[in-house]
Amino acid sequence: MIRGANHNPRRWTDATSKVRVIEGWHPSRPGRLGYNLIVEGEWIGTFETLDEAAGAAAPHLPSPRQGDNRPVALLPFLDPGSRGAT
């Protein structure tokens, strides 16, 4: 099951599409899934949970209010070219 994550990873994005999270594993840690955070095309890091990735995205985005670092709301990314949700 873990190996299949890199072949058909689940993906999430925020409402602005500036934040993307891709589930997968790294060859150095093949037994553990992680959540790769990408903000505006820049890889930020790999996180243990989806919630951690959402929280880490906030400081990398402009905020409407000073000091507002609430976690980013992530939604499942639906790829129209695939057979269902990813």
Image: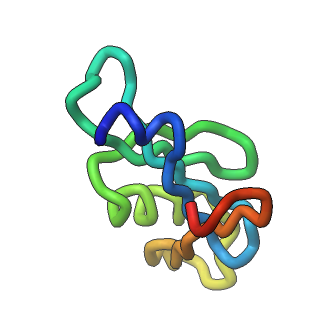
Q: Residue at x 65, y 51 (%)?
A: 39
Looking at the image, which is closer to me, 63 or 51? 51
The structure's colour scheme is: rainbow
Instruction: Single out the residue that lies furthest toward the top.
Output: 28
On-image quarter of the C terminus: bottom right
Instruction: Single out the residue that lies furthest toward the left.
Output: 31
In the rendered image, residue 17, in percent from the top left (x then y), is placed at: 74, 66
In the rendered image, residue 44, in percent from the top left (x then y), is placed at: 54, 40
Q: Residue at x 39, y 25 (%)?
A: 26
Looking at the image, which is closer to me, 70 or 80? 80
On-image quarter of the N terminus: top left
Instruction: Single out the residue that lies furthest toward the bottom.
Output: 65
In the rendered image, residue 68, in percent from the top left (x then y), is placed at: 51, 78
Q: Residue at x 52, y 78 (%)?
A: 73
In the picture shown, does residue 13 fall above or below 1?
A: below
Looking at the image, which is closer to me, 35 or 54? 35
In the picture shown, does residue 85 fall above or below 48?
A: below
Among the 4 quarters of the image, the one containing residue 75: bottom right
In the rendered image, residue 64, in percent from the top left (x then y), is placed at: 68, 83
Looking at the image, which is closer to me, 81 or 37? 81
